[in-house]
Image (cartoon, rainbow, N blue to C red):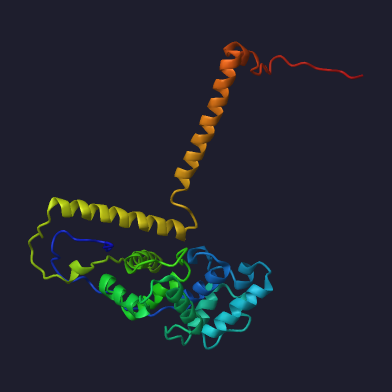
Amino acid sequence: PTPVATVAVAAPSGPVASIEDVPVKAIDILLVVVAQKLKKRVDEIPLSKSIKDLVGGKSTLQNEILGDLQQEFASSPEKSEELPLEELGSALGSGFNGTLGKYSTGLISRLVGGEMPGGFNASAIKAHFAKSWVLGPARSDGVLSLATTVEPAKRLASEGEAKTWLDGVVTIYAHCSGISLSAHGAGGAAGGGGGGAVINSEEFIKFQADQHKFAAQHVELYMRYLGGDSRAGEIAFDQEKANSLALQAKLDSITREHGDTYLDGIQPRFDILKPRHFDSS
């Protein structure tokens, strides 16, 4: 089984604190729409820039973003493309009740249908958020909306894999929202005795292995979110090591054929204190 984010060895002393169920803000949806079209992360979109600035003169892309916003919100201000995103988000938020619109709902449906394993639908995802993270339906909408900007590279094969990926998105959501979250999983529902639960060494070793695997999966998710590769350093090191070995093999071959005297004799002897001047006149 795939581990949850935190597995408590000791029994919990009380219930996990609930998080206020805050509706999605218009600015959050605006950032998701723009990030989707620009194929960037939400945190790469500067609020001080306008849509016109961000598209870099691509009028077709600008019109697509404006069309998506019209689908999402009941109304939008004149010349929306020229307003800084922060100002535009504030204008779109006037009268906005936090309910996801047609465009963002479509993005989430595409994510669930295309990337989640069969049978693991939006209701099951929100049930997981409620059980493991104590998130209400409004915050769950916020997480799913953000998830559309960090979609996995391929369809997730199992429910366990999907939950692990979603847990990673929750942590990104918490960071972006400035809130503190901790998963409690099945252990959080246990009764509140003060004593520690008994766990044998085999179970503890398995627990540690599961936690290491879980951490590695999160590192991979964060690197994907940042547009990087968690193995980039290792791959570069292996490549440089292979190059170094190949060069050393060539030098060894030359040394065996000609000896050290030859190699020493062909080294550069440049000395800045011994210049030579030529006059072509």
Q: Residue at x 47, y 63 (%)?
A: 153
* Residue 168 drawn at (x, y percent): 36, 63
Q: Residue at x 38, y 55 (%)?
A: 219
Q: Residue at x 7, y 61 (%)?
A: 195
Q: Is residue 84 left or right of residue 121?
A: right
Q: Residue at x 59, y 75 (%)?
A: 83
Farthest-out residue, top = 261
Q: Is residue 54 left or right of residue 138?
A: right
Farthest-out residue, right = 281
Tell me the quarter of the picture where residue 71 sits. Answer: bottom right
Image quarter where the C terminus lies is top right
Q: Is residue 57 left or right of residue 116?
A: right
* Residue 93 drawn at (x, y percent): 48, 82
Of residues 132 and 244, the one drawn nearer to the viewer in this rendering? 244
Image quarter where the N terminus lies is bottom left
* Residue 155 drawn at (x, y percent): 44, 67
How many marks are shown on the rendered structure?
0
Tell me the quarter of the picture where residue 268 sits. Answer: top right
